[in-house]
Amino acid sequence: MSTTRLVAKNTLFQILGKGVSTVLGIAAVALVTRALGAAGYGYYTTVITFLSFFGIVADLGLTLITAQMISEQGADEPRIVRSIFTFRVVTALVLFSVAPLVAHFTNYPDVVKWGIALTAASFFFVSLQQTLVGIFQKHLVMHFPMMSEVVGRAALLGVTIYAVAFGKNLLWFLGAVVIGNICNFLLVIFFSRRFVHLGFEWDTKIIREMLHRSLPIAISIVFNLVYLKADTLILSAVRSPAEVGLYGAAYRVIDILIMIPVMMMGVILPIAAAAWSSRDSARMSRIIQKTFDVFVIYALPFLVGGWLLAPRIMSLIAGDDFAGAGAPLRILLLAFVAATSSTLFGHTIVALQKQRSVIWVYGVDAVLSLAAYLFFIPRFGMTGAAWATFGSELFAAIILATVVIRTTRVTIALDVLIRVALASAVMALALELAGDLSAIVSILIGGGMYCATLMLLGIHKKIL
């Protein structure tokens, strides 16, 4: 089977799997928000965000580096995987043991501190699971981790339903996250054994090379940590748990939407790295152009439709108490479009092995973002947080795109973008004419008009 067909097959499997996983995840969010209310969900969001800081630091860029190193010609895949996995076990164990100790010295309520201690186990297993994803990316068999994720989400939903049915507290809902991620991890371990005999191994040469490659990504990730997660933590320090809950619910929608671009770039990264290392500039240009076109088709209608339907969407997902989350959701959808672009160009920079040359981008972005958060959030709350987040994502997207275009000398055609913008405008008009219908009916009308217009404009001929 050709590489193009394998990529298409893997992408299709991932979209289907991610679709099922997303539905299960949204169902769990709907139950949690309704059971805990805005304030309770604010505490839930605080726990997850606090641990995300340690999770992002623990990543060190190893997911990308693993895929890159084992995809190179002559690579000793089993030894590379075992060495990186061993390194990840040690570092993640240290970091997620420290997290509850750090939380102990904060001013968070006791239930939040206990929640952090409990949920640290979940992030530990996620960290290990992510390290192994590179195996499936290399062999273009991403349906295996997708199956694992679906089972994990099903377990999460099952425990969540139990917690709702018996009126359990916040810790039970966080425990559901732990159980779901453990199930996901165990299945990933099981499937990975088809390709690599896992075990613990410490090859100093491999570890040294991995650290050399990952250091620029790790530094960038630490900077990303500031402009991606500091907003919620600062908001939790200066505003009510209820406002944190509204912002967290809106941000959760964005987290779900950005999964597809990240997933696709995980599949494309090894192929782009191979094209660049073999000096096939024409193929590299095609990869960037096609991916850009697909991302435009995916992201733009969510921005336009979401902007018009934001309060109704939040009420549908989280309950009527969360309709107020529609205001920050509109702004965060702008950030989502920018993040989609930076996902494309950020992963491409890894394929180009230009990580070191863009560290300054994330450093400057982190400083500007933190300054914006500290200025705007105390004054404007979740609205200020959302606008500052958009600014930080836009800055990163513009600079990363500039670096990739200058390095590859690719010229990105905008024909698909123009057609998608026209189809999105038709969708917006249909939604305005439809009036104040339910969120589900409006989504069906808008989505139907968008897809029909794309077909009439022949968009399928452009991307296939």
Image: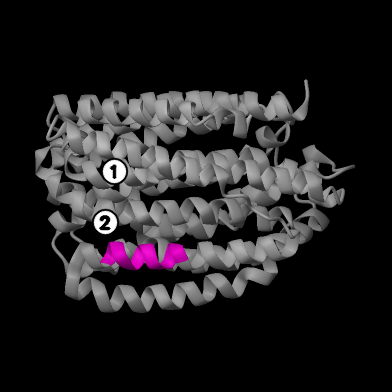
Question: As displayed, is residue 142 above or below residue 39?
Answer: above
Question: As displayed, is residue 335 above or below residue 13?
Answer: below
Q: Secondary structure at mark 1?
A: helix
Q: Residues within 10 Å of mark 2 (few under 14, many from 20)?
A: many
Give me the disc on residue 306: 1
Is residue 311 toward the left or the right of residue 259 in the image? left
Task: Give the mark, 2 or 1, whose residue is nearer the N terminus.
Answer: 2
For the image, the number of numbered tags is: 2
Question: As displayed, is residue 351 above or below residue 464?
Answer: below
Q: Secondary structure at mark 2?
A: helix
Q: What residue is shown at x 67% (from left), y 30% (from top)?
A: 7
- Which residues fall within the magenta stretch? 385-394
- Mark 1 is on which residue type? Gly
Q: Quadrant of residue 308?
A: top left
Q: Nearer the viewer, residue 428 or 198?
A: 428
Is residue 82 in view?
A: no
Is residue 224 in view?
A: yes
Q: Which residue is mark 2?
A: 113
Q: Quadrant of the C terminus?
A: top right
What is the distance, in whole Å, between disc 2 and disc 1 at their CAs?
A: 35 Å
Q: What residue is shown at x 22% (from left), y 68% (from top)?
A: 237
Q: In this rendering, which labeled residue sits more in front, label 2 or label 1?
A: 1
Q: Residue 263 appears at what percent x and percent y?
A: 55, 39
Q: Residues within 10 Å of mark 1 (few under 14, many from 20)?
A: many
